[in-house]
Amino acid sequence: MKKAAAEEAKKPKISDAELVKQMHTELPRKIPSKISGPWFYVCDGTASEPTGRQRNELYGQSLGKHQDKDGNNVFDLAGRQVPDWLASASRSGNAITLAFMDPTELNNPDHGVPSAFGEYTALLRNGTENRDRQIFFAIGGIAFTGFDWLQSTETAEVAGENACEVARKYNVGIEIDHESSRGNDVEGLRSFLTGFRRQCPMGKFPVSIDLMGSPGGGGLPWAADAVKELVPEGSPSDPPPEGGPYLDFVNLMVIGGCADSACLTGFWSQWKDYATLNFKRAAMTFEAGGVDGICDKKEADIINGAAAWAKEQGAYGFRAWSVTPAGGGEWDPSCDGIGAPGIQAMCAAMGLCDKPQ
């Protein structure tokens, strides 16, 4: 251990500015016609993994880069790695959400972006097959109720402008996970989008919002109105519609306790029945781990049945909650060892990956 530490100390140090420069990834060339992929739960705000220097031993201590067989730079940034299956868009999908940023920190100079987000973005976009993978930075989550800036037009627009700065700096999309109520939620979200769209137009920088699995979930009466007013016709890959500002799409969050596709689709259907949600701009969510999770299921009726229903609706895609860097919570790290075949099966059901072998 001492020898390893000594060798590590001899390695040249890279400044934060140089590290950010090395990690820069290009904006995806287009918005995908369908999406699939998991949430990658990194931290809540900056509480647990703010800088990437708080190590789990599974992730090593190397720092540097090398070239793969195709001549692409492969970064071993700050000792961080991701499971092989997650590092491959052909196995895990073309859309990954990093969770969560603290909404109260959007006005900070760094806008509350954990440095680990930048590192993971570089790793998840590394290599030719990942060139156009869409990465989202999620703001909010159940741990945060700090969306007070929704209460006024001015503060909401400023928050949107700041979120756009984040999107442009890291070439990512933004995801809002607002699971409370501030009394001016729909108008506040409209103002947020107004500020965001000034420099981050539809068709280049997508914005999504997470909604409960059914319109009545969570007791959030504003959610159905937000769908009616902020989700346009068409699909995210279509030319941007006139009017707005608009959300690109919504994520219908996990429904706990559903062990078959009929249960899931019954809840999802409520959004069309009661809130006129355009499913061409909706992604449906599975549990990734746990008793009802799909991570280890390469042949799963719950996925196949939901996929048949989603195809009929023209749904935008599938998501899965969630993977964590070192296991725990809703994720069983043993699934990494077998390559998370259920996540690949979910992706294959959207026509974006081959079926797992």
Image (tube, helix red, strand yellow):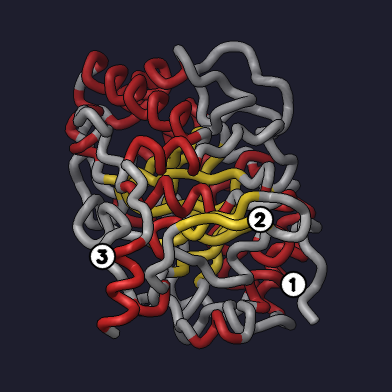
**On the rendered structure, is 189 left or right of 37?**
left
Q: Which is closer to the viewer, label 2 or label 3?
A: 2
SS category of the residue bearing label 3: loop
Of mark 3 and mark 1, the one earlier in the sequence is: 3
Residue linked to disc 2: 67
113 vs 259, left or right, is left
Which residue sits at x=52%, y=73%?
288
The amino acid type, in three-letter code, at marker 3 is Gln
Upstream in the sequence, badge 2 or badge 3?
3
Write down the residue under mark 3.
54
Q: Nearer the viewer, residue 56 or 171?
A: 56
Q: Which residue is mark 1?
A: 304
Q: Is residue 189 above or below residue 339?
A: above
Residue closest to the eye, 52 or 271: 52
Q: Secondary structure at mark 2?
A: strand
Seen at 29% across and 85% down, the residue is: 1
